[in-house]
Amino acid sequence: MITPWKVKSKSSNADWYGAEIFRAGLAQQPINPYFVTTTKGKRKADLYIPKETAKDCNLDTTQELLLVDPQGREFPAKCKKWKDGRIVVKGGWRRLCRRNLVAEEDKCICEFVQGRNDGRLVINVSFVRANGHLG
C-alpha cells in the first residue's frame, strides 16, 4: 500500500508536527498546540505527548484529560509522567482508536483546545487515513 507521506524507520525522529500531511493538503493545520502520532505496536493503549508540545501548552500532568473524536464522543483519560520524563495518556486512547477503526498506518492529529469549566484538558483527535482520506 502506498501512503501519501514518507514512512519513517523506528530509528529516525518522528514527525510530531505532520509536515507531510499538511503540505499534501490532506488536513488543515490546527491553530492550537498539537502533535501528530500513530498507534504504537505493543503500546496501543498509550498516547505519548511530545515534550515540546507539553511545554507549549503548559501541560499539568496531574490534570484529567478528555479525548474527543471527530463525532464529538468523549473518552476520559489521565496523564502520567514517567521517571524518564516522557508523558503518556492512560485510559481512553485505546477505546477512541477502536471506536474510530484506527489502523496502525493512520495518522492521528491531537490538538489541545481550551479546557472546560470542569478543569479537564481537552484534546480533539482527528484522523488522516493511510489511504489519504480524513476520518
Image: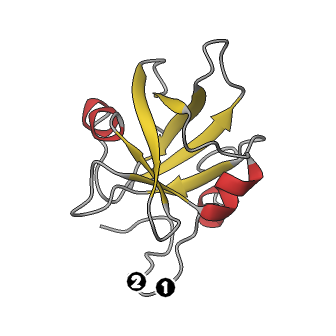
Q: In this figure, which colouring scheme has been used for the structure?
A: secondary structure
Q: Where is residue 21 shown, x and y percent of the image?
A: 59, 58
Task: Rate crowding at label 1 as few (under 14), some (14 to 19) or many (20 or more) other CA atoms within 10 Å.
Answer: few
Please indicate whether residue 134 sits to the left or right of residue 25 in the image.
left
Say how many tags the image has: 2
Q: Is residue 133 visible?
A: no
- Looking at the rendered structure, the kind of residue marked 2 is Ser
Report the disc number at residue 12: 1
Element type at marker 2? loop
Residue at the (75%, 40%) spot, across then down: 32
Indicate the amino acid at tag 1.
Answer: Ser
For label 1, the SS is loop
Which image quarter: residue 53? bottom right
Q: Visible in this render: residue 89?
A: yes
Q: Is residue 35 above or below residue 113?
A: below
* Residue at left offset 60%, top offset 54%: 35
Mark 2 crowdedness (10 Å alpha carbons): few <14, some 14-19, many ≥20:
few
The residue that appears at 21% across and 63% down in the rendered structure is 42
Task: Give the left or right position of residue 41, taking residue 39 as reference.
Answer: left
The image shows residue 48 at horizontal and vertical percentages of 46, 56
* Residue behind mark 2: 9
Q: Is there CB contact under 8 Å for labels 1 and 2? A: yes
Q: CA distance from mark 1 to mark 2?
A: 5 Å
Report the side of 65 relative to 17 (left or right).
left
Q: Residue at the spot x=63%, y=42% of the render? A: 60
Residue 55, position as x, y percentages in the image: 72, 56
Please name whichever residue, 54 or 12, is drawn nearer the observer in this view of the structure. Answer: 54
